[in-house]
């Protein structure tokens, strides 16, 4: 009798979990959480229940509760590399990058071939300005990654930020050897060329990125800035307008237009565009310097 009841109980739990998976797939996170709350109240030893609730909370942006359930998933015995990696992802979303590092290091300690954890460590150390650490972990991540496009892009960005432009170009070219239609990789190559003051090449690479994906405001903005530095002001303005067409919230475009109109001797339009820029909360973080 006990065995029959036990089997029925397991069957019901499995049915409930399948139902919850479908709810999460349909983005009905609140309903999934309600059902998980009920199941957990009956049995708080199943890590998979906390895992699904963790993911539901994460999708809702409730990171504090997601972190609690991520820890419960691990404490219930499911202390896998993937679960530590997920914990790090959630902590990173809260802005506690230094704490996220610890979770990703634990992920690697559980599985030294977890290239996603190496990539995440690269992201964290890059954000923390620890470029040498970022490079070291990204290089480790390359060893077990079957298609390391993202790692090459990030590695190139780190080298570019650290003014190692030759290494940045080497990394991004390896990425493009793997995926020649990766528009963000062409954009990254354009940024490197810009920093080298090779504006003609930068325009060529921005144009290549746009030919693959034409809806990114930043691609037009940065190409326009290349034209600005070549003193081709009308072409710069054309690109700035295309940038606004793709994203009218990109306020840095107004600053670029203000610079350009000032160079063209049109002070009234320069003032209007500068006022549009100052009405926003934009900063110059990560922004090109004009010559």
Image (cartoon, helix red, strand yellow):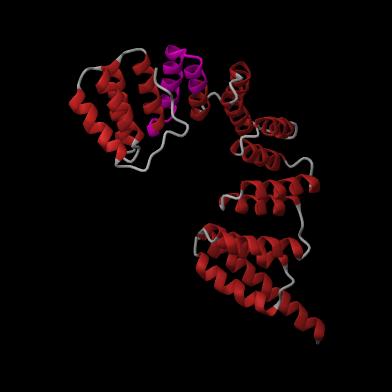
Looking at the figure, which quarter contains the C terminus? Answer: top left
Q: Quadrant of residue 70?
A: bottom right
Q: Position of residue 105 (x, y in %)?
A: 74, 45
In front here: 274 or 101?
274
Looking at the figure, which quarter contains the N terminus? Answer: bottom right
Q: Image check: 196 left or right of 173?
A: left
Q: Position of residue 222 (x, y in %)?
A: 40, 25
Characterize the magenta stretch by its predominant secondary structure. helix
Residue 208 on the magenta segment = yes
In this rendering, the answer to whether 190 lies above or below 275 is above
Q: Position of residue 172 (x, y in %)?
A: 59, 23
Magenta residues, start to end: 190-217
In front here: 216 or 266?
266
Q: Position of residue 236 (x, y in %)?
A: 31, 21
Q: Quadrant of residue 170?
A: top right
Q: Quadrant of residue 277?
A: top left
In this rendering, the answer to whether 233 lies above or below 75 is above
Q: Image check: 121 left or right of 208?
A: right
**Residue at left offset 71%, top offset 30%:** 139
Residue lying farthest left? 268
Residue 209 on the magenta segment = yes
**Residue at left offset 66%, top offset 54%:** 87
In this rendering, the answer to whether 215 lies above or below 50 is above
């Amino acid at each position: 009798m006990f065995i029959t009841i036990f089997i029925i109980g397991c069957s019901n739990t499995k049915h409930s979990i399948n139902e919850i998976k479908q709810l999460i797939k349909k983005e009905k996170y609140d309903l999934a959480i309600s059902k998980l709350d009920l199941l957990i109240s009956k049995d708080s030893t199943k890590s998979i229940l906390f895992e699904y609730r963790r993911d539901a909370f994460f999708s809702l942006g409730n990171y504090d509760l997601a972190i609690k359930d991520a820890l419960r998933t691990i404490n219930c015995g499911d202390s896998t590399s993937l679960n530590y990696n997920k914990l790090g992802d959630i902590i990173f979303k809260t802005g506690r990058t230094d704490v996220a590092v610890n979770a990703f290091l634990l992920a690697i300690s559980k599985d030294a071939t977890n290239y996603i954890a190496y990539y995440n460590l690269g992201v964290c150390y890059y954000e923390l300005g620890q470029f040498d650490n970022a490079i070291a972990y990204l290089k480790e991540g390359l060893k077990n990654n079957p298609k390391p496009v993202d790692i090459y892009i990030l590695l190139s960005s780190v080298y570019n930020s650290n003014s190692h432009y030759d290494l940045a170009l080497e990394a991004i070219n390896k990425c493009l050897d793997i995926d020649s239609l990766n528009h963000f990789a062409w954009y990254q190559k354009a940024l490197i060329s810009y920093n080298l003051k090779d504006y003609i090449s930068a325009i060529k690479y921005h144009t290549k990125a746009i030919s693959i994906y034409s809806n990114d405001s930043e691609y037009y903005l940065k190409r326009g800035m290349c034209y600005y530095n070549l003193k081709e002001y009308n072409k710069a303005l054309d690109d700035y307008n295309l940038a606004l067409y793709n994203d009218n919230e990109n306020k840095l475009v107004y600053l670029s237009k203000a610079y350009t109109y000032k160079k063209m001797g049109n002070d009234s339009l320069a003032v209007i565009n500068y006022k549009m820029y100052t009405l926003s909360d934009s900063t110059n973080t990560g922004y090109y310097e004009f010559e």
